[in-house]
Amino acid sequence: MKGQHFSLITSTISILSILTTIYNLEGHSNVIKNIISPILTVALADSMADGLGIYIYETSANQKHKESISLGLQTMLSKFMFSLIYIVPFMFVNKHYTIQYAIITSFILGTCIVAFVSDKIAKERNENRIKAIRNNILFTATIILITFYITSAISHLI
């Protein structure tokens, strides 16, 4: 379950950060393709990298080889699948349901996922659930905002 919690949070932050960056590309031809392609790329590359990272970490922590492989594969598959969730809102884009609505839907979905996972972990640890949810949503928002402003600055320099 640890790998799935990790996967939910990291895939949410990665995809939402990418969405804010790609939003700056609006106006370019085929915006939907410009959004879905990076989501798929990150879903695949990031999930494989995290799966390998979990495998290497677990192996170095003296876990059995078979358990390390299992945790690495679970992390990879769950992160890939969770990342694909963010493609769904963009599949419905039309003249009434715009890209902006799809991005807002993704942010609402991502915030709910972070809140759900934070609540679940805080409950298991008998910690203050509201504080955990608030802190993790604030951390997520901070990462996304930093990413947005850095990429905006870079795009103005290029």
Image (cartoon, rainbow, N blue to C red):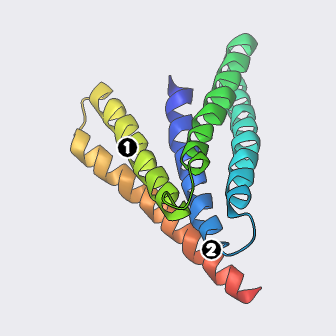
Q: Distance between the residues labelled 1 and 2?
A: 24 Å
Where in the figure is residue 8, as x and y percent of width and height? 52, 37
Q: Nearer the viewer, mark 1 or mark 2?
A: 2
Task: Identify residue for label 2.
Answer: 24
Q: Who's the residue at 60% across and 68% down the image?
A: 23
* Residue 158 circle label: none
Task: Give the left or right position of residue 68, taking residue 96 as reference.
Answer: right
Q: Nearer the viewer, residue 24 or 78?
A: 24
Vertical arrangement, residue 154 with respect to residue 3, above or below: below
Q: Which of marks 1 and 2 is nearer the N terminus?
A: 2
Check the image and report above or below for 40 versus 80.
below
Residue 133: x %, y % from top left: 31, 46
The residue at the point 49 percent across, 32 percent down is 5
Q: With 129 as the anchor, is 48 left or right in this view? A: right
Q: Do the residues labelled 1 and 2 touch (CB within 8 Å)?
A: no
Q: Outermost residue, front direction?
A: 95
- For the residue pair 65 and 48, the one nearer the viewer reads as 48
The crowd level at tag 1 (other Cα within 10 Å; few <14, some 14-19, many 20+) is some
Quadrant in which the C terminus appears? bottom right
Residue 24 placement: quadrant: bottom right
Amino acid type of disc 1? Cys
Task: Look at mark 1 in the image and give the residue it sits on.
Answer: 112
Q: What residue type is labelled 2?
A: Asn
Q: Position of residue 78 (x, y in %)?
A: 61, 28
Q: What element carries label 2?
A: loop
Q: Callout 1: helix, strand or loop?
A: helix
Image point 57% across, 45% down: which residue? 86
Q: Position of residue 82 (x, y in %)?
A: 57, 35
